[in-house]
């Protein structure tokens, strides 16, 4: 597979260690450039009713999250201030998506021990806002349990 990638990005069948490392660096730079271009596109793009209507349920959450995240400053130290300045609907989608991403990657434990737990107290309200009362109850219980064990 790696040889196929090298061929795709200009490598030959037999490559030296230096050319492989150079190919990896070139690929990494292309990926970073592509992601920056995509982020810049989303940052300037306004979500329209048509875009929302045409997105599948799964794609809709990603579309909205990426549109929100693209507007964040490069310094994520201002993440809380940025989230608090969002309209309630976007705020809810953002903090619910962050929880989902952390839980799917490493469980609730990862969420609470990573920096994103700063949104934990906002989660029940966010889930209630989007009509997911069962999840609101679940995160309320998880928040309570976590506070007990951290004392």
Image: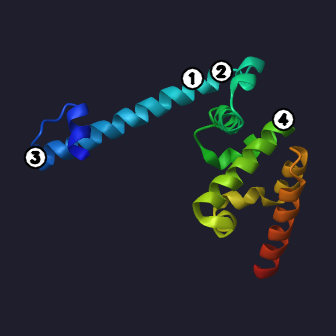
Disc 1 target residue: 41
The CA distance from mark 1 to mark 2 is: 6 Å
Disc 2 target residue: 45
The CA distance from mark 2 to mark 3 is: 43 Å
Q: Which of marks 4 and 1 is nearer the N terminus?
A: 1
At 69% from the left edge and 35% from the top edge, which residue is drawn?
A: 68
The CA distance from mark 1 to mark 3 is: 37 Å
Q: Are marks 1 and 3 in contact (CB under 8 Å)?
A: no
Q: Do the residues labelled 1 and 2 touch (CB within 8 Å)?
A: yes
At 80% from the left edge and 69% from the top edge, which residue is drawn?
A: 142
Residue 25: assigned label: none
Q: What element carries label 2?
A: loop
- Dividing the picture into quadrants, the one containing residue 40 is top right
The CA distance from mark 2 to mark 4 is: 17 Å
Q: State left or right for residue 69 relative to residue 120.
A: left
Residue 16: assigned label: 3
- Evaluate whether residue 151 shows in this view: no
Q: Do the residues labelled 3 and 4 touch (CB within 8 Å)?
A: no
Q: Earlier in the sequence, mark 2 or mark 4?
A: 2
**10 Å crowding of disc 2: few (<14), some (14-19), many (20+):** few
At 84% from the left edge and 54% from the top edge, which residue is drawn?
A: 122
Foreground of the two, 5 or 77: 5
- Dividing the picture into quadrants, the one containing residue 90 is top right
Q: Where is residue 78 in the image (x, y as percent from the top left)?
A: 68, 45
Position above or below: 68 against 136: above
Disc 4 target residue: 87
Q: Do the residues labelled 2 and 4 touch (CB within 8 Å)?
A: no
**10 Å crowding of disc 1: few (<14), some (14-19), many (20+):** few
Q: What element carries label 1?
A: helix
């Amino acid at each position: 597979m790696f040889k196929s990638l090298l061929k795709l990005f200009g490598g030959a069948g037999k490559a030296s260690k230096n050319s492989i490392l150079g190919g990896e660096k070139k690929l990494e730079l292309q990926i970073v450039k592509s992601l920056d271009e995509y982020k810049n596109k989303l940052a300037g793009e306004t979500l329209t009713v048509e875009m929302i209507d045409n997105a599948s349920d799964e794609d809709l959450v990603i579309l909205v999250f990426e549109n929100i995240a693209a507007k964040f400053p490069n310094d994520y130290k201002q993440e809380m201030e940025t989230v608090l300045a969002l309209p309630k609907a976007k705020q809810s989608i953002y903090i619910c998506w962050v929880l989902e991403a952390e839980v799917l990657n490493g469980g609730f434990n990862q969420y609470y021990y990573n920096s994103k737990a700063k949104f934990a107290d906002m989660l029940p309200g966010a889930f209630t806002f989007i009509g997911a009362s069962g999840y609101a109850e679940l995160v309320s219980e998880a928040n309570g349990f976590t506070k007990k064990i951290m004392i």
